[in-house]
Image: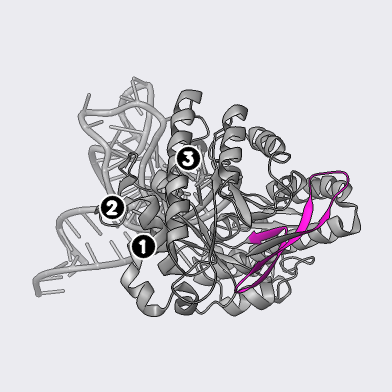
RNA sequence: GUGCGAUUAGUUCAGUUGGUAGAGCACCAGAUUGUGGUUCUGGGUGUCGUGGGUUCGAGCCCCACAUCGCACC
């Protein structure tokens, strides 16, 4: 796997690049739709490719391990074949899910002991078995096992948490080097920079993680309760620390405005449940602002969903129709909203790429952030 | 026709010894950041079937009427 920087913006940290994988090239900056359990909820794979323009999607180790199981994944020949997706897949390690979902968890030097949120059964993720599991899934990009430190943690807690993440990373990298891909194509892994909102810890974490980074590196533990300004500060701090030849992945972020601000601070890759989860609950992101489709004001608005939208749903259906579907509790509502939001997110990063290439990204970004954060 | 029961928010219902009304759902808003097809927060939207009566005061007690349900002729 190889990352090539194509262009760097003169007035901001924004960059364009190409990440070459066994399942095709990824043009950065990029947004990666989240497909936790082997599907981007409510969206056909052919729509992801042709209508939305997704170049890579996510899977989740925690959910696939608990819900599907390793035997079936292995028998299926890996996640690509199982879910019929021939472009790249990135899998999260499950460290975040243990932090956000498991009712009981215990972090030990050995690994992370947790109970399933589904049936309460006990499990352990170690760096070693986490590598093995992501090998079985067959992700193009595997994520290191880390502890996602809460945004409001004390320096003392963050210090200890980082030490654990660092030791897990060392073992993860060692085991990765000793194992082979199972399905005949290259897999790569990204280490994760933690350190909460503390500059000294973030820099230390970055320097340590860089020792294990090949094509790319991830920034984790942000957008987990800390103020957005703190997140931007951390990105500004890390931007000069990470070499230009590494792809930078900001995990779990965010709103369309977060994407543009992240790109301006040197981030190349994003993923977030927001376009799909919030979409399923009626929120639409557009170039003209944010709409809550459940609002009564759309009841008699028969104009097309989004005049500026790139998806077919934007022109096939009206605002009043989508509101009706949401109020009626129709599955189709979530499908249309997810399709629209993902198409918009991918359009945002495509437009960002275009403006970086053309050299006017910084100005365009400032104007655009104002526009897309309006409430309609 | 007679007897009994019911009638309170959009809906299903609660409402104490009489002190001008509450809950669930729905509805109206807001939140949601490495997805549990969610979850959380806020908002009561009312001619208490109608008309009289008793009372300082009636959703509640009394009378009549209306409508619905059940039972019996």
Which residue in the protein does label 3 denote?
A166
Chain at numbered mark 3: A
Residue at x-position 76% and y-position 51%: A372
Give A124 or A109, whichever is nearer the viewer.
A109
Residue count near mark 1 (Cα–Cα under 10 Å), binned few <14, some 14–19, many ≥20? some
Q: Are marks 2 and 3 on the same chain?
A: yes
Residue B33: x percent and y percent?
54, 48
Q: Secondary structure at mark 3?
A: helix
Please name which of the two marks, 3 or 1, marks the residue nearer to the observer: 3
Which residue in the protein does label 1 denote?
A65
Left or right, A21 with respect to B64, comes to: right
Left or right, A247 with respect to A43, comes to: right
First reached walking from the N terminus: tag 3 or tag 1: 1
* Quadrant where the image shows the N terminus of chain A: bottom right
Which region of the structure is painted magenta?
A5-31
Left or right, A372 with respect to A272, comes to: right
Query: Residue A14: within the magenta?
Result: yes
Left or right, A51 with respect to A86, comes to: right
First reached walking from the N terminus: tag 2 or tag 3: 2
Tell me the distance, in whole angstroms, between the alpha carbons under discs 2 and 1: 10 Å
Tell me the distance, in whole angstroms, between the alpha carbons under discs 3 and 1: 24 Å
Residue A83: x percent and y percent?
48, 76
Given contact means CB atoms under 8 Å apart, are the residues at marks 2 and 1 in contact? yes
Q: Secondary structure at mark 2?
A: strand
Query: Residue A314: within the magenta?
Result: no
Is there any visible trace of residue A214 in the rendered image?
yes
């Amino acid at each position: 796997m190889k990352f090539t920087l194509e262009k760097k913006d003169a007035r901001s940290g924004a960059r364009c690049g190409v990440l070459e994988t066994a399942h095709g090239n990824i043009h950065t900056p990029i947004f990666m739709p989240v497909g936790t359990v082997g599907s981007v909820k409510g969206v056909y794979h052919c729509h992801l490719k042709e209508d939305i323009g997704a170049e890579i999607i996510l899977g989740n180790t925690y959910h696939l391990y608990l819900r599907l199981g390793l035997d079936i994944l292995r028998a299926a020949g890996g996640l690509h074949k199982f879910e019929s997706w021939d472009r790249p897949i990135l899998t999260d390690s499950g460290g975040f899910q243990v932090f956000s979902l498991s009712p009981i968890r215990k972090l030990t030097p050995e690994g992370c002991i947790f109970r399933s949120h589904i049936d309460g059964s006990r499990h352990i993720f170690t760096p070693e078995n986490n590598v093995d599991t992501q090998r079985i899934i067959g992700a193009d990009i595997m994520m290191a096992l880390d502890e996602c430190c809460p945004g409001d943690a004390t320096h003392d807690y963050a210090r200890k948490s980082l030490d654990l993440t660092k030791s897990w990373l060392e073992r993860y990298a060692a085991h990765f080097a000793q194992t082979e891909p199972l399905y005949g194509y290259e897999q790569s892994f990204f280490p994760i920079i933690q350190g909460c909102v503390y500059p000294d810890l973030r820099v230390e974490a970055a320097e340590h993680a860089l020792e294990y980074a090949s094509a790319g590196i991830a920034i984790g533990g942000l957008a987990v309760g800390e103020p957005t300004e703190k997140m931007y500060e951390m990105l500004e701090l890390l931007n000069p620390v990470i070499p230009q030849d590494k792809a930078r992945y900001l995990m779990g972020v965010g709103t369309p405005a977060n994407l543009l601000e992240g790109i301006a601070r040197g981030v190349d890759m994003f993923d977030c449940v927001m376009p799909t989860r919030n979409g399923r609950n009626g929120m639409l992101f557009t170039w003209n602002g944010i709409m809550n489709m459940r609002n009564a004001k759309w009841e008699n608005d028969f104009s097309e969903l989004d005049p500026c939208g790139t998806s077919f749903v934007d022109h096939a259906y009206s605002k009043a129709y989508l509101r009706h579907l949401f109020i009626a509790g129709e599955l189709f509502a979530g499908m249309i909203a997810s399709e629209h939001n993902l198409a918009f997110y991918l359009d945002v990063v495509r437009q960002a790429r275009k403006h970086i290439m053309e050299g006017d990204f910084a100005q365009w970004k400032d104007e655009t952030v104002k526009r897309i954060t309006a409430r309609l």
